[in-house]
Amino acid sequence: MGGPPGEPGELIGRERELAQLGDLLAHHQVVTVTGRTGVGKSHLARAAVRAFQSSWQSAACLRCPGGPTAQERLARAADDALAGLRPHRRAPRTTGPRGSRGQALLLLDDVDAAHPECAGWVQRAVMQRPWLHVLVTSCQPLGLGAEGLLELAPLATEAPADGVPSPAAALFLSRAARLTGLRQDRTVLRAADDIGRAVEGLPLALELAAAKTRTHSAQQLAELVRHGQCWLSSPHPALRRHRSLARAIGAGYARCERQLRIVWSRASVFAGPFGQAAAELVCAGGGVAAHEVPGLLARLAAQGVLESDHDPHGPAQPRYRMPRAVREFGGLRLAEAGETEVALERRASHVRQVAQIAEHLWQHGCQGHAMQLLEEEQHDLKAMMRHAVQRPDLAQDALDAAGRLWFWWTKRQHTSEGLRHLLQLLSLHPLDRPESGTAQWLAAWLAARSDPDTAETLLRHLWPQALLAGDDLLIARISHVQGLVALFRGDTVKAAECFEHASECTPDRAPGGPGRAVYLAALAVARTVQDPAAAQRAARAALAQPELRDDQWSALRAHYARAFVDRQQGRTARAWNRARRALAQPGAAICAPNTYAALKDLLHAVESGETVPCATRVERAAAVLDRRPVPGISR
């Protein structure tokens, strides 16, 4: 054990971390490289020992023993490795990390199986031997006072430039070329980037995927890893537990106590970041008390199972995210325990609570907070919608939650996906039920900008129901969507008639959707060419609505309509001032991003002298959707 064994393979994408590790070794007697399973801690540490070997009188590497007797065997193996080390007699004249007190280096690799014993041994060893430096790799720090830490993150998945692979893709391509002779071209490069993003830059997953190029093309691999990763394996790994990604993650799972395993598996039901309150709802029960969940989450984060987004100096509670491969492994354990359906129902309950809170915030003037809350919870919201498509008995609850969040689906980034979810859920739900009216109207509104035929089909089902029920508010919203379809098709006369009808039918402070101010703003835009005076009256009436005091979303649309009418009628200075004032409102970009972008476009048109067509509107067009018929709704 007198010198570090060589390790094949080049270090890709870790040059900066290697330099950081060298600097830490120069200033700390104990340095720990931490990170989640498969992130490449051992590879980096051994590369550092090789790179800076000339800076030490002697160096040794010890891979800590595993198994149930790891704790007993660690001290003996570490003492044996230490016996072969000798300190410097004088400092060498070499470059690289050189501690001011120590001249020998010992690498203790993969100490998780005996973490407490390793911490105690290292503490005693460095206190008794000032000339000793210890480099440790572990999923969590040793917890020593003078310990230097390097937290290793997965490789970056974004390409630095066109035609240049990302660090994650570069590792995959290098390993695949060495193992199977994979040749690079544009198609392979794109597939490598897709693989890197799918596995979130995890080096172990990338190397296992590279080994699969013997039997799969890069394009096939990219598609397969998008749907799952725990199947990745290799017959000839450097470590036995690295034979598969599931086995590597399972080694950490096996070291966890029962409560940690329970929280790990139950938390895997979350599709994205989650907070402590949601985790308590989903993870509590069966031997885990609700008040114990926050502490267990913190321990899982310390072990690299969870990623924590937390400002220790701020008042907000931490939010956690489970990496994709870890979440897949936890989902398998959850299914084995027979708790998947219960966990999904609890997640759906959490999403319904989020929808109710967001709706309450929106209605009471805290629209920026409502949008921020939904952006944080969007992954689980959309996952609940996807699950409800597979469970028709949950369709009504999902439609109800979607209807409460009408304002969020209108954001361009979510429109296409929201429409797809609504159409799929409506195809599973009877259209003649009164409770489906809100979802049908919302789906028609979302479709009006990109698929007006589907919007009109939905409205044909909904219009008789609204008339028979005497629901003036629903009639107004149907008229609004009909006006949008007409406006986008260039029929401004019909659009104006529909918008005027919508404004007349809408009561004051209408809940669950846009109010009269939005319809009057749309009316002003539609009448700009045919009747400029009427357009001015409609724009002024939109700004005079009392609901705008607590509704910044509608107020911005009204300001846009007034500025648009001024611009079209030649009052460019007034239009410029109105648009500037509207854009300067605090939180405008958060609560109404579509209108904010439309105001910026209008401001640019005023400044550049460009013509603004009548088709310019408060709600900018979304990307054209894949027009796939939905039984009972779409053509």
Image (tube, rainbow, N blue to C red):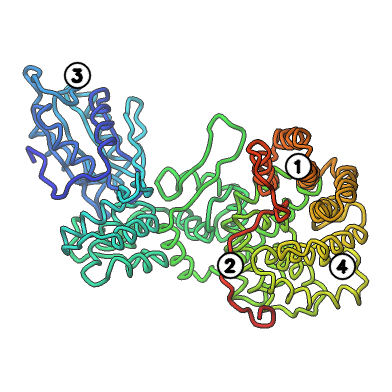
Q: Which residue is mark 2?
A: 625
Between marks 1 and 2 in the image, the one whose residue lies nearer the viewer: 1
Q: Quadrant of the C terminus?
A: bottom right
Mark 4 to mark 1 CA distance (whole Å): 32 Å
Q: Earlier in the sequence, mark 3 or mark 4?
A: 3
User: Which label number is shown at residue 567?
Assistant: 1
Q: Residues within 10 Å of mark 1 (few under 14, many from 20)?
A: many
Mark 1 to mark 2 CA distance (whole Å): 32 Å
**Seen in the image, is 425 located left or right of residue 140?**
right
**Image position of 205 with respect to 452: above or below:** above
Mark 2 to mark 3 CA distance (whole Å): 66 Å
User: Which label number is shown at residue 101?
Assistant: 3
Question: How many numbered dots are placed on residues in this image?
Answer: 4
Residue 314 showing in the rendered view: yes
Amino acid identity at mark 2: Leu
What kind of element bears circle 4?
A: helix
Amino acid identity at mark 1: Arg
What kind of element bears circle 1?
A: helix
Q: Which residue is mark 4?
A: 475
Q: Residues within 10 Å of mark 3 (few under 14, many from 20)?
A: some
